[in-house]
């Protein structure tokens, strides 16, 4: 992707990451004030995805500034693995929030998602390690491991989104004053989150088409940011 397009994506990414971390901090403060364990878990998820994606952006910036500097390359590689892991953690907390808020506790699907999160972390960081070995077989292994970790992240993303939509359909979330309007916003937020996850899935297929990659990356950031605001504000309300 040309530098001017990358700079736009970096700027948009920083706005998105600041938004997710801001929603996360606000949600954590609200959860602490209300003594709401479920909301605390969700707030932590927002904070983690913001941090992970910020590290990813900084990794790309580092290699743009110093493309031949080994530490910059290593930082970018492991920042990518961290971003994949923490994004999966966020989608997992969305599902955990639904289970905890409905008073069900952690069920089989929740435990399976936690195992999926652990598997995603292992695959992503193994892939990052393989990227540091300059041989063809390691590159092939890298692509396989990273592709597997992204697929697991996408699975977690869809489960989280559709868990929220199912809770709205059941009428169990959100509750309290203005619940109907908040449910409408939550539906839109969940739908946009599912769309963002789809853009994540599409992203690897357009890496050799700069303009398409720019459009997909921009739409991914915009839909994630919008969904974060809609979901966070819908669930934080008293």
Image (cartoon, rainbow, N blue to C red):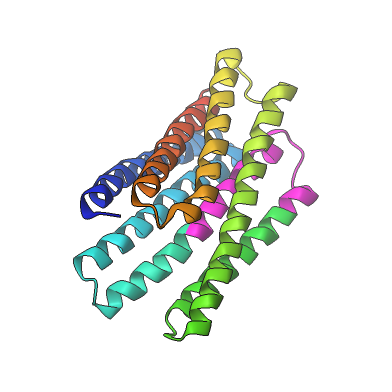
Residue 135 x %, y %: 46, 86
| Residue under the image location 58 percent in, 70 percent down | 144
Q: Residue furthest front?
A: 209
Residue 38 vs residue 14, the one in the foreground: 14
Q: Is residue 92 visible?
A: no
Residue 217 x %, y %: 40, 46
The reply to whether the magenta stretch includes residue 80 is no
Residue 13 vs residue 103, the one in the foreground: 13
| Residue under the image location 24 percent in, 77 percent down | 69
In the rendered image, the vertical position of residue 110 relative to residue 126, given as above or below: above
In the picture, measured across the screen, residue 38 lies left or right of residue 58, that is right
Q: Main secondary structure of the magenta part?
A: helix
In the rendered image, the vertical position of residue 137 relative to residue 24, given as above or below: below
Residue 163 x %, y %: 68, 36
| Residue under the image location 50 percent in, 56 percent down | 86
In the picture, measured across the screen, residue 112 lies left or right of residue 144, that is right
Give the residues drawn in magenta, as a range.
84-111
Give the number of marks.
Answer: 0
In the rendered image, the vertical position of residue 165 relative to residue 72, given as above or below: above
The part of the image, by quadrant, that contains residue 102 is top right
| Residue under the image location 35 percent in, 54 percent down | 54
Q: Is residue 170 visible?
A: yes
The part of the image, by quadrant, that contains residue 219 is top left
């Amino acid at each position: 992707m040309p530098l001017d397009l990358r700079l736009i994506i970096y700027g948009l990414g920083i706005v998105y990451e600041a938004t997710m971390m801001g929603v996360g901090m606000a949600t954590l403060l609200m959860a602490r004030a209300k003594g709401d364990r479920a909301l605390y878990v969700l707030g932590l998820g927002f904070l983690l995805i913001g941090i992970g994606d910020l590290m990813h952006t900084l990794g790309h910036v580092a290699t743009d500034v110093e493309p031949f500097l080994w530490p910059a390359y290593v930082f970018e590689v492991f920042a990518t693995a961290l971003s994949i892991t923490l994004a999966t953690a966020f989608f997992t907390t969305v599902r955990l929030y639904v289970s905890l808020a409905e008073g069900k506790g952690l069920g089989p699907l929740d435990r399976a998602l936690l195992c999926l999160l652990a598997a995603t972390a292992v695959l992503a960081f193994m892939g990052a390690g393989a990227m540091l070995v300059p041989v063809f077989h390691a590159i092939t292994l890298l692509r396989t491991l990273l592709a597997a970790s992204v697929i697991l992240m996408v699975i977690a993303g869809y489960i989280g989104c559709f868990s929220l939509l199912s809770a709205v359909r059941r009428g169990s979330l959100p509750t309290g004053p203005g619940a109907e309007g908040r449910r409408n916003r939550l539906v839109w937020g969940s739908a946009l989150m599912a769309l963002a996850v789809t853009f994540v899935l599409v992203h690897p297929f357009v890496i050799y088409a700069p303009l398409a990659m720019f459009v997909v990356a921009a739409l991914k950031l915009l839909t994630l940011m919008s969904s974060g605001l809609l979901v966070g504000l819908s669930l934080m309300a008293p």
